[in-house]
């Protein structure tokens, strides 16, 4: 077999002479490419190392927040008003959920049932396959979360969170408030003490795979710091009873709304702060501002006749009148700078005590016109009117008390019996601590305290005792607040009925009914203030509408506090009680 030999030197391509610069150019390109690779490696490993490390961590490393357990809110006796319990929040990677699989479809139907969600709504959340994360539903009961986990649906996951529970429900809703799904306070004490209750979340650095599963932990774990417990001054039993009686009275008189405030006369602690209408804090669907508003703190009204004890108290304190001083209210009206002030009926000749007992606008006006406007303003201010109560609570208002230099005579007259100024129910209740503490006003608080409050003098002790006796007469036979009496305990208080102002005018047929008082009279332990807004069942006077709530709350609260009864007789109510003047 012959072998063919190839003469490579005879090839015209190989025989052609290549220019020297071409080979050098190729070598230079190779060298430049190598230098580029070296430069890139240097940039990645040295110059831009931090950037690329961050990008890697963004894709694979995560910082997991370790939620802190929110502090509890307790009443004065240690009963729970708000606490946190474990909850399951369901999320998904939509692109990983195989909705075409018959098995998965069956499981999704079960999932929708557990979520209490329509199946189309669930599928709409999973419809976008480009999504890598979507919340399905948050803060489910923990046992429901365990049932969902047992379905073992690929692409459906859950996270442990905490949700708040409110055992006292709607009765304490306006005090406690609520949190959102992020466990941040939104209303009430939950908002006021959000920082203290919330604690500080911890953290844990981990590496995750694309399914969200933790592969390994990296770095040190920072443990969460749980929130502090808050103990309020509120007594949950008093709170519930006050709410219940308020709700029933509003229904009876077909009223729009109402509030009750109970204050410990020795410490200034708020034992109850109830409002109606209310809401259930952990079921807040379709809530309205009418339900959310804490009327006792945020709404201000003209207090009406409940202001008369302060006007009379000032006159007594300065020696201008005595309890037995005669005041002629004939013929049941008086004219001040062209404006007429009237009583509901002609009470004739009264003593100063009788002016309070009969709630005479004419008698109060005649006494007030003997007083300098500056002294009235100073007394009202000292009693807390026109000043914001020092309560650490959202929405607290100051009310309105104009400077005395702007008062006209008719305005001074109307302010003496509660028109032309405004106050909240909490302000009104706190102001009556003057008559329960020897003439000294004490600060109010919503946190439990063990020390008696330090008061600021407004009247002398003698004046406070005199006014307290008048308040007892006003709540007794022949007074305007007879229905505020209660079995076993002496009470003193003042009813008030104020026309409701809408815009710049008083609305026809719309009233607010008040009653503010204390018990027992000789050694007051509690102050109770009641307001009923727009009673519309035919009766609207404060003594008839708000007085009964006062009496029932006083009796129940004093019994719960272990206060011994100071009276062995039943309440005395005459057939035709006196109606206070508007």
Image (cartoon, rainbow, N blue to C red):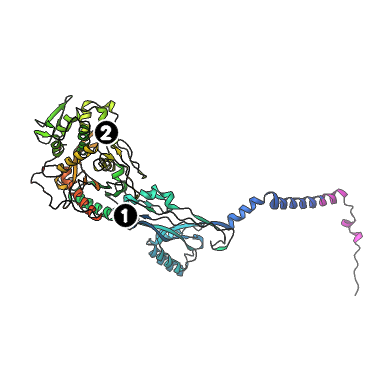
Q: Quick check: 524 left or right of 153?
A: left
Q: Quadrant of the C terminus?
A: top left
> Across the whole image, how many numbered discs are drawn on residues?
2
Residue linked to disc 1: 280
Is residue 36 among what the camera can see? Answer: yes
Assess whether residue 570 is covered by the magenta stretch: no
Front residue of 497 and 537: 497
Residue closest to the eye, 312 or 450: 450
- Judge whether 430 appears above or below 138 on screen: above
**Residue at (9%, 35%) from the top-left corner?**
347
- The residue sitting at the top extreme is 337
Give how far across and how far down residue 156 sits, in percent.
47, 63
User: What residue range appears in magenta?
Assistant: 5-27
Q: CA distance from mark 2 to mark 1?
A: 40 Å
Quarter the N terminus occupies: bottom right
Question: Which mark lies nearer to you, 2 or 1?
Answer: 2
What is the crowding at mark 1: few (fewer than 14 residues within 10 Å), some, or many (at least 20)?
Answer: many
For residue 13, side relative to residue 338 (left or right) = right
Could you tell me which secondary element the residue under label 2 belongs to?
helix
Relative to 196, is 210 above or below? below
Which residue position is annotated with label 2? 379
Residue 300 in view, yes or no: no
Residue 419 image position (x, y, % from top left): 22, 34
Are dots 2 and 1 in contact, CB under 8 Å? Answer: no
The answer to which image quadrant residue 459 occupies is top left
Q: Residue at x 38, y 65 (%)?
A: 113
């Amino acid at each position: 077999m012959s072998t063919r030999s190839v003469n490579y030197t005879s090839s015209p391509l190989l025989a052609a002479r290549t220019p020297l610069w071409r080979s050098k150019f190729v070598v230079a390109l190779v060298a430049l490419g190598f230098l580029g690779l070296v430069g890139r490696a240097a940039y990645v490993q040295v110059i831009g190392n931090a950037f690329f490390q961050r990008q890697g961590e963004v894709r694979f490393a995560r910082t997991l927040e370790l939620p802190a357990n929110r502090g509890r809110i307790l009443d004065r006796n240690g009963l729970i008003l708000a606490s946190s319990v474990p909850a399951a929040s369901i999320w998904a990677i939509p692109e990983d959920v195989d909705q075409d699989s018959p098995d998965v479809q069956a499981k999704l139907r079960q999932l929708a049932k557990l979520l209490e969600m329509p199946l189309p709504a669930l599928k709409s959340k999973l419809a976008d396959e480009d999504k890598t994360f979507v919340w399905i539903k948050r803060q489910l009961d923990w046992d429901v979360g365990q049932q969902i986990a047992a379905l073992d649906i690929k692409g459906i996951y859950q996270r442990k969170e905490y949700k708040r529970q409110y055992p006292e429900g709607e009765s304490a809703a306006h005090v406690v408030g609520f949190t959102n799904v992020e466990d941040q306070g939104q209303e009430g004490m939950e908002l006021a003490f959000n920082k203290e209750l919330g604690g500080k979340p911890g953290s844990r650095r981990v590496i995750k795979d694309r399914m969200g599963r933790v592969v390994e932990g990296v770095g040190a774990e920072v443990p969460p710091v749980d929130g502090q417990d808050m103990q309020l001054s509120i007594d949950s039993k008093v709170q519930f009873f006050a709410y219940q009686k308020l709700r029933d009275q509003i229904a009876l008189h077909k009223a729009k709304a109402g509030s009750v405030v109970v204050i410990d006369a020795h410490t200034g602690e708020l034992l109850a702060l109830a409002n109606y209408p209310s809401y259930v804090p952990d079921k807040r669907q379709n809530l309205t501002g009418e339900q959310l508003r804490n009327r006792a703190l945020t709404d201000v009204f003209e207090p009406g006749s409940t202001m008369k004890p302060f006007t009379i108290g000032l006159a007594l304190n300065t020696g201008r009148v005595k309890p037995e001083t005669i005041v002629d209210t004939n013929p049941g009206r008086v004219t001040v700078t062209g404006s007429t002030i009237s009583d509901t009926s002609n009470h004739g000749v009264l003593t100063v005590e009788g002016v309070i007992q009969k709630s005479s606008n004419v008698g109060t006006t005649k006494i007030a016109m003997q007083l300098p406007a500056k002294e009235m303003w100073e007394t009202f201010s000292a009693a807390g009117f026109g000043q914001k109560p020092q309560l650490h609570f959202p929405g607290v208002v100051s009310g309105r008390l104009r400077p005395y230099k702007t008062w006209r005579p008719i305005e001074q007259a109307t302010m003496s019996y509660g028109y032309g100024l405004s106050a909240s129910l909490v302000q009104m209740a706190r102001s009556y601590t003057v008559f329960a503490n020897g003439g000294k006003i004490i600060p109010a608080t919503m946190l439990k305290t063990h020390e008696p409050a330090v008061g600021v003098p407004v009247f002398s002790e003698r004046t406070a005792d005199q006014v307290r006796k008048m308040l007892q007469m006003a709540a007794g036979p022949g007074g305007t607040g007879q229905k505020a009496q209660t079995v076993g305990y002496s009470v003193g208080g003042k009813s008030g009925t104020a026309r409701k102002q809408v815009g710049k005018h008083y609305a026809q047929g719309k009233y607010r009914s008040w009653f503010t008082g204390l018990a027992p009279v000789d050694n007051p332990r509690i102050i109770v203030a009641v307001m009923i807004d727009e009673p519309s069942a035919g009766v609207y006077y404060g003594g008839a509408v708000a007085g009964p709530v006062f009496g029932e709350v006083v009796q129940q609260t004093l019994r719960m506090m272990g206060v011994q009864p100071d009276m062995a007789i039943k309440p005395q109510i005459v057939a035709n009680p006196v109606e206070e003047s508007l």
